[in-house]
Image (cartoon, rainbow, N blue to C red):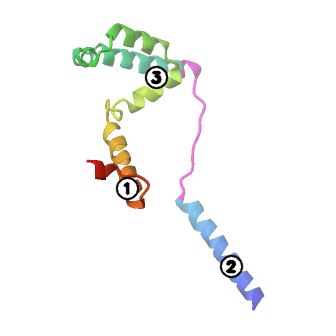
Amino acid sequence: MTRLLTRSAVCMLISIFVITSMVIPSVDAKMIETSMYLDQTQTARSDLVSFMAREDVRNKLVALGVNPYDAANRIAALTDQEVSQLQNRINDLPAGSGVLAVLGIVLVVLIVLELVGVTNVFNRL
């Protein structure tokens, strides 16, 4: 009986491995030339500089209290990896978007502490 169970378990594992190996796509890695990499990083940096040079972006920076020249100097000081990360995530990183999440978490923590009886925050209000 144990031999039959072992044989069926091994067959099931082999079939799972075969099925998953057919479903998972293969990766094809190739070498790129150094000049191609440098061109991509220079393009990313110039795209970021041109983004910062737009009039609406400059107005927003001034409205937020940031000197546009300081921002341009900071961009010039970024490494290639930081420029790539910033360029890839610039549309996903709106300014101040995490404030509501932090306030919500603080509120939930206060409610939990109030329910447990650790604090009396809401009784004082």
Q: Residue at x 38, y 13 (%)?
A: 71
At label 1, counting other C-alpha atoms closer than 10 Å, the crowd grade (few under 14, some 14-19, many 20 or more) is: some
Q: Residue at x 24, y 17 (%)?
A: 63
The label nearer to you, 1 versus 2, is: 1
C-beta proximity under 8 Å, tags 1 and 2: no
Kindly indicate the quadrant of the structure image that contains residue 33: top right
| Membership of 36 in magenta stretch | yes
* Residue occupied by mark 1: 114
The label nearer to you, 3 versus 1, is: 1
Kindly indicate the quadrant of the structure image that contains residue 96: top left
Residue 86, x across and y down, in percent = 43, 27
Locate residue 45 relative to residue 103 in the image: left or right: right
At label 2, counting other C-alpha atoms closer than 10 Å, the crowd grade (few under 14, some 14-19, many 20 or more) is: few
- The secondary element bearing badge 3 is classed as helix
Mark 3 to mark 1 CA distance (whole Å): 45 Å
Locate residue 94 relative to residue 77 in the image: left or right: left
Instruction: Give the dominant element type of the magenta stretch: helix, strand or loop.
Output: loop
Q: Is residue 107 above or below residue 51?
A: below
**In the image, which disc is placed on residue 83?**
3
Mark 3 to mark 2 CA distance (whole Å): 50 Å
Amino acid type of the residue that numbered disc 1 sits on in the rendered structure: Glu
Depth check: give the residue in front, 75 or 45: 75
**In the image, which disc is placed on residue 9?**
2
At label 3, counting other C-alpha atoms closer than 10 Å, the crowd grade (few under 14, some 14-19, many 20 or more) is: many
